[in-house]
Amino acid sequence: MIKIYSAANIIEAQIISGLLKAHEIPVFAGGQLLQGGIGDLATMDFATISVPEEHIQAARELIRQYEAGELESD
């Protein structure tokens, strides 16, 4: 798995993870268990999204669409 995105927080990482899973892209949302250490850890780059190398391009395009507000909900 290759890290392709650093989410603003755990909630955003879960939203993006769900989006990618809904499009049948295998995904790993990292850093979820680090949320409890926020007072002791830097708050940057702990909520990450990783996908297999063969899915990087499709995942990045979906994330771009998500950030641009281009995705429609069904």
Image (cartoon, rainbow, N blue to C red):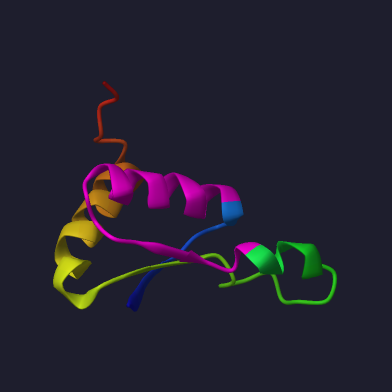
Residue 38 appears in the picture as rendered: no
In this view, the residue in front, 65 or 34, is 34
Relative to 16, is 42 above or below? Answer: below
Looking at the picture, how far across and down is residue 21, in whole percent?
31, 49
Q: Quadrant of residue 38?
A: bottom right
- The quarter in which the N terminus is drawn is bottom left
Q: Is residue 54 left or right of residue 17?
A: left
Q: Which residues are magenta?
A: 11-32
Q: Is residue 1 magenta?
A: no
Q: Is residue 27 magenta?
A: yes
Q: Is residue 63 left or right of residue 35?
A: left
Relative to 22, is 25 above or below? Answer: below
Farthest-out residue, top: 74
Residue drawn at x 61%, y 62% is 32
Q: Quadrant of residue 10?
A: bottom right
Relative to 72, is 53 above or below? Answer: below
Q: Is residue 43 left or right of residue 20?
A: right
Looking at the picture, how far across and down is residue 4, in whole percent?
34, 71
Q: Is residue 50 left or right of residue 30?
A: left
Looking at the picture, how far across and down is residue 35, in whole percent?
71, 62
Residue 30 appears in the picture as rendered: yes
Looking at the picture, how far across and down is residue 14, in whole percent?
49, 49
Q: In the rendered picture of this protein, how many numbered marks are placed on residues?
A: 0
- The quarter in which the C terminus is drawn is top left
Residue drawn at x 56%, y 72% is 45
Residue drawn at x 24%, y 35% is 70
Residue drawn at x 59%, y 71% is 46
